Image (spheres, rainbow, N blue to C red):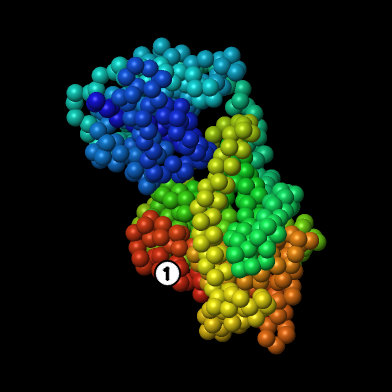
Amino acid sequence: MNTQTIALVGPPNSGKTTLFNWLTGRKQRVVNYPGSTVDLAVGAALPHLGPGAEKIEFVDTPGTYSLFAKSQDEEVTSLTLFGGRYPIRKVIVVIDSTHISRQVHLVKQLQEAGFAVVVALTMCDLHEKEGSRVDIELFERELQAPVVPINGVLGGGVKDLVAKVGAIDEPQSEIRRLTPWSTEKLREVFDGGERLARSVAKNELRVFDSTRGLDRILLHPVFGLVFFFVVMFTLFTAIYWAAQPIMQAVDWLFTMGAVGVKYLIGVNPISEFLGDGVIGGVGAVMVFVPQIFILFFGISLLEDTGYLARAATLVDRPLSLVGLNGKAFVPLLSGFACAVPAIMAARSINSKKERWLATFIIPFMTCSARLPVYALLLAFLFWDKPWVAGLWLAALYFGGLVIGLVASGLLNLVVKSKTPSFFLLELPLYRRPKLAVVLRNSIRRTKAYVTKTGPIILMLSVGIWVLTNFPHITTHDPRARLEQSWMSAVGRRIEPAFTPLGVDWRVGVGLMSAFAAREVFVSSMAVMFSATNTGSEHSLRASLIDRMRHARMPNGTPVFTVASVAALLVFFMLALQCLSTVSVAYREMRSRRFAAFQLISMNILAYICAAGTYWLLR
């Protein structure tokens, strides 16, 4: 069976990935800004889309404004079309019907390159809602290519699209890479696009009026920035206090699980292993998953309304002061979820220098892995004042951002570049987000977080339990068992390195284990301090904090004080403890030097600042 490989090509925000999902059934994330779809997605057409659909394979390329690549994601699209990896001779060009004048030039470029082209016209539901329409027949005559209107919400027009792309003949001529157009030709094509848009879609949509009205406020140089800071501040403070009821429920489930195991089996090494090592260690981190869900939900909500693109525009000028531009905002904000996809999203930045700077400072952003650590330490300081803890959580988020921007400004003075910088971003229309879609995407992201970190947390929790309980597992006194354990022998050797932070070897071991996954610090503390041994009257989180309050140094002084906890917060805010991030930074920048410099410099900075914090507050 001969399979046709057909590429989907279109600008960011055009609805290309939504169409890909309808064509293939793939559940791929759709976002409202450039740089999110960096890697290719490939999928076979769904069989029910018509005769011959089983012979079609679609390639979803990264969003591109032009075949003349100016960023890494545009280069990926160009390489896909012309590099020979896939035998592509037919292309579906996805055009937003509300932005015909600015996107039709992509059709002209693909036709000139020799591809057989079918145009998928998206966002047609907006025209239908307002009783407007696009003259499809005139559009087809002007473009000399089939045009199929698509309803991205309901999937209307997808079968017709498959039928038309299957019916057109493959080009007989050779596919060739274009040389950049002259300024005169570009002006001619864009002027033609303006005339074409006016002739095929004569009535301007009313939704543009509401978008322009909102933009006058949300893009205002003063009010827009105020609104931006209010939105970001509300999001990060809500992460703490809004999740409390769900966290308490999750906490109760794990606490009952740990207590139930000991009740059913009896207090013995097996029940302690299952209750303290497995359920207690994993539960100490899983209790913070509701906060991570709220973070993903908030970001998805901002994406789907179209506000994130405006935020990138607002921060373009401030970012330019530290060597970046507005395109860096999306990778930086993505870093608040996870640094790995954020660094990959930095490919959308056209300037090599700006991409270098953005990739370097992304780990300063407070990723979801830091959230369980922050939540635990802030709960220790402000157990009965969740709103105060929420304010400090927001301060930690903004603190990481500020430190990152300062680092970018300093490095900008050293790193030189010959590539000119520019900021080009097409603002999408404001749209009412679909709550079901936002919830589904947030659940999927949260599930991915749990499945990614869960096995690591389980493995290390079990390992730490074994090392803190052996070789004297039969000793009934937990404190004596810990003092004589293998972990104690290792921890005391490294304890001098952590004394400047005001903590003992037990916390030091937790900090070292956090280099596998930051969340492991919480499970390490739960296992190290036997948080589930206080009885059923305490929740797992309350039990851990209670043990932390009573933890003592050999000289009797508390391990956890305001000074030492503040030092730990500063360390986690600045340290690069994610080996996956180091790996992807090396891969993206193709430089061991870069990855090593990033890892060493950030951790030295974190150590010095944390030690200084402890010295000032003790």
Residue lying at 43% horizontally and 51% vertically, measured from the top left: 344
* Residue 97 visible somewhere in the drawing: no
- Residue beneath the point at 74% across and 67% down: 534
- In this rendering, the answer to whether 15 lies above or below 338 is above
Pinpoint residue 249: horizontal percent, then vertical percent: 72, 50
**Residue 247 placed where, x, y %?**
70, 52
Label 1 Cα crowd, 10 Å radius (few <14 / some 14-19 / many 20+): few
Residue located farthest toward the front when viewing the structure as drawn: 265
Q: Is residue 42 above or below residue 411?
A: above
Q: Position of residue 238 (x, y in %)?
A: 71, 50
| Residue at x 53%, y 22% (from the top left corner) | 154
Can residue 28 be seen from the camera position used here? yes
- The kind of residue on which mark 1 rests is Phe
Q: Position of residue 574 (x, y in %)?
A: 56, 67
Q: Would you say 309 lies left or right of 76 here? A: right
Instruction: Between residue 424 and residue 256, name the one nearer to us.
Output: 256
Residue appearing at x 49%, y 22% in the figure: 155
Q: Nearer the viewer, residue 310 or 464?
A: 464
Residue 138 found in image quarter = top left
Of the pair 126 and 159, the residue shown nearer to us: 159
Residue hosting label 1: 597
